[in-house]
Amino acid sequence: MLTLMASCGHRHEADVMLGQADSLTVAQPDSAYRLLSEADSLQRHWRKADRMRYVIALAKAMNKADVPLTTVSGLTEAVGYFDGHGSANERMRAHYLLGCAFRDMGEAPLAVKCFYEAIDCADVHSQDCDYITLSHVYGQMGEIFTAQRLTHMQIEAYKKYSLYAQKAGNTYEYIRGIECLVQPYYQLNDTAKVFEVTEQARRLYLQHGMKQEAARVYPTAITMALNGELWKKAYGMMHIYETLSGLFDRQGNISKGHELYYQSQGRYHLGLHHPDSAASYFRKLVSANYRLEGYRGLLQTFIQLHNTDSVIHYSRLYERALDLFVRNMETEATQHAAALYNYARVEEIAKAKSSEARRNRRIIYAGIVGIGMGAFGLLLRGKKRRKERKRLQDAYAATQQDLTAAQHELSYLRQALPQQEEEARQFLTAKEQRIAELETAITNYRTQLGILDVAQREECLKNNDIVKHLRTIGQPHFVEDKNGRRRLLPPRTASEREFDTLRKLFKKYHLSFVLFLDSTPALTRLEYKVCLLSRVDFMTKEMSTLLGSSDQAVSNARTSIARKLFQLSKASELNSKLKEV
């Protein structure tokens, strides 16, 4: 009887503390640590099931309260317990919270692994599936993929985040998941998708009475409109954002944490040739500690004003800010990599299970061997390439000597042999054919060695596969499937990868052109691409299709390029000027 009473008492004790843990839903770190301390002293009397339920409940509460989870020991035990004794929802929650702990400890690869395991545990066909937790799993994955710039995986994660939030009846998170898609589409430079998803999220917010949230969806879309010089579209979105978002005071100052928006305001006024207004916003950027963006904007402003002294002054400030930015990026990248790939932590976990440790050691050894073989292969490959280039250079030099000798010999024979004799004419014709063969061989060697004259480089540029490919996708064209059936494909925009391939083509055959464009910070992303396409004589209509923009926007971009690069008032001579670079 005494044992039964003690057991009931411990069970009541566990239920009370579980209730306290479940009620911890706001940022209450002191309460969380107090509960954790009390639970440590009492759990030894509880049944294992109660201990595991408490670990999960407390971790869930701490996660809601933004209290960092700094240990995985209890959660690892809970995952093992619920994998053997829990329901699908309990297994999913345990793996999800273990992933959140790894996330808080800066171990993203392990966090993502746990999140995938949580997804595998979910039974989405069950009526009692915990869609709320499942949506949070995908939301956390989306944040990690965002930090890693894994754009396509980020899109998929946020789509699932939105889908399961909708199934859970969480309207705000459903719409928020759609809004989260705007940024990755911007990274992919998909103008149409950025505008489409932005308006979709705004429409849904308005349908559910969330007016401020509806106005706050616009900053990324505004930036995209400014990139394409769509001034009217940008103005409409800016007006809604500035008047209805609730982020601005009566003097037009934006709330703390949103100051980067001043850059959009400055760019808008700079594009409309209001340099004084633009300068005031760029100075606000500098005051808000966005020095790189502020000084860059001020530099562009005084270039527009033709103020040489100020251009020199802000060029120096921008250069210093850029240097500091690059140094900070390098430091953050190093710290980020160290946090993400904390192999010491992985090794510690591996040692907990000897079989896994042995397997990991084999993987490490195989990796070392693989890296060694790869390095050796690269060394051999580099040596082979150098040997092949040396062979080509020797053959090129020898062929040039043969050509020079043959030309001198032909010139001499034309004077020495009687032209009227058939045998002499045949002999001279054979010599001429030999010279033509040597000239062809020299052209091939020059191509392989990258030694091309201007005309040959132009020929290589215009006839390259990527240029032909861009011309094809920029207009309707037929393709055949494996069964020989033809179907018409509509024109489409070019991807960032395709533009990157085009840029690499210029680096190969016309490096000075790429260096010239890269040294001109005043060019927008759209203008840079228009320069590449104009250099290989694409028409305005073709460029607007490939860029997903309007003919007018491309024409405006060409006029702006002509002014920025060559001080021309019209774009009629732009192509010829670009070819002179």
Image: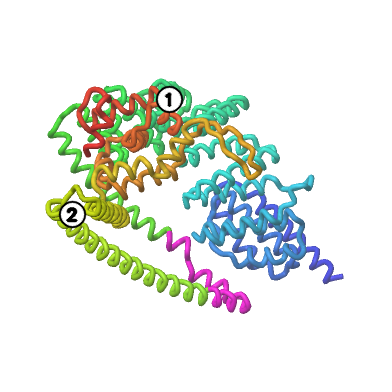
Check disc 1 and give the amino acid type: Ser
Q: Position of residue 127 (x, y in %)?
A: 79, 45
What count of labels does the image hold?
A: 2
Q: Position of residue 279 (x, y in %)?
A: 25, 29
Q: Is residue 397 above or below residue 229?
A: below
Q: Is 141 inside the magenta-drawn segment?
A: no
The mark closer to the camera, 1 or 2, is 2
Determine whether, in the image, residue 509 is placed left or right of residue 84: left
- Residue extent of the magenta highlight: 337-363
Which circle marks residue 410 in the picture?
2
Q: Position of residue 345 (x, y in %)?
A: 51, 69
Judging by the rendered image, the residue that carries numbered circle 1 is: 550
Q: Nearer the viewer, residue 189 or 69?
A: 189
From this viewpoint, is residue 418 visible? Answer: yes
From this viewpoint, is residue 435 visible? Answer: no
Q: Is 359 inside the magenta-drawn segment?
A: yes
- Quarter in which the C terminus is drawn: top left
**Rendered residue at 21%/50% (across/down):** 421
Q: Marks 1/2: CA distance?
A: 59 Å
